[in-house]
Image (spheres, rainbow, N blue to C red):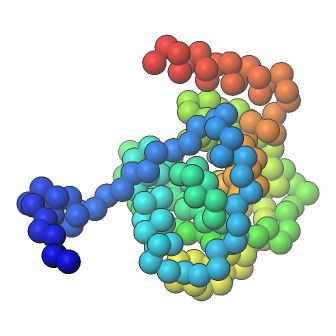
């Protein structure tokens, strides 16, 4: 076998490899898949995680589950990209977080409401109620186990992303009437595009 030679364009694309994967959109049935546990932290997983961050930042979004790019594995990436200071116009600072095989150990009775959106339900938003404080465990991309109490937007976002692992979308938390309205709007926007 001969070793292939890469031409210049291919080689530079290879070096600056930035991989944005297509995001599945509702009502794609693959979004209903129940994702399986990650058993090994290998190169394929690291590539998947890198691609998920590229895809999420490009969209842009603050959270993405692997199934949203068609991979039914229990992997999530989150970056709330919150401004460093409360100062208005302060640039967001990247704080990439990886959640492998996440579990919610406890959720508060106290609920909070957030106007949620989802990269798989483009440009549609609705208020969803979820426990405001959760105790969660997960593994990071180096294989370290974490167990922490989370609140605020991070708690909301993690619960939204974890729903994806069970094939659940945020619109499933709405009344049927609201959900149908939202899907109608989504289809209308698609036809107009
Ligand atoms: Zn989502």
Q: Residue at x 79, y 68 (%)?
A: 104
Residue 132: image location, x then y, percent: 78, 56
Q: Quadrant of residue 138?
A: bottom right
In the depicted structure, whether residue 145 falls above or below residue 8 = below
Q: Residue at x 9, y 61 (%)?
A: 7
Q: Quadrant of the C terminus?
A: top left
Q: Quadrant of the N terminus?
A: bottom left
In the depicted structure, whether residue 72 falls above or below residue 40 = above
Q: Residue at x 83, y 72 (%)?
A: 105
Q: Quadrant of residue 9?
A: bottom left
Direction front: furthest residue: 1
In the picture, measured across the screen, residue 26 lies left or right of residue 2, that is right
Q: Residue at x 43, y 50 (%)?
A: 21
Residue 140 visible in image: yes
Residue 88: image location, x then y, percent: 42, 45
Residue 120: image location, x then y, percent: 59, 40
């Amino acid at each position: 076998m001969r070793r292939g030679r890469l031409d210049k364009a291919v080689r530079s694309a290879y070096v600056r490899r930035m991989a944005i994967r297509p995001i599945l959109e509702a009502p794609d049935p693959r979004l209903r898949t129940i994702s399986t546990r990650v058993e090994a932290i290998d190169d394929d997983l690291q590539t998947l995680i890198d691609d998920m961050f590229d895809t999420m930042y490009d969209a842009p979004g603050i959270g993405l589950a692997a199934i949203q790019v068609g991979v039914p594995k229990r992997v999530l990436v989150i970056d709330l990209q919150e401004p460093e200071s409360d100062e208005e116009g302060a640039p967001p600072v990247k704080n990439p977080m990886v959640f492998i095989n996440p579990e919610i150990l406890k959720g508060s009775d106290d609920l909070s409401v957030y106007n949620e959106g989802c990269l798989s339900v483009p440009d549609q938003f609705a208020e969803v109620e979820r426990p405001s404080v959760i105790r969660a465990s997960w593994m990071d991309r180096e294989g370290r186990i974490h167990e922490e109490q989370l609140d605020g937007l991070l708690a909301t976002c993690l619960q939204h992303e974890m729903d994806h692992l069970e094939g659940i979308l945020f619109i499933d938390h709405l009344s049927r009437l609201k959900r149908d309205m939202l899907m109608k709007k989504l289809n209308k926007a698609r036809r107009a595009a």
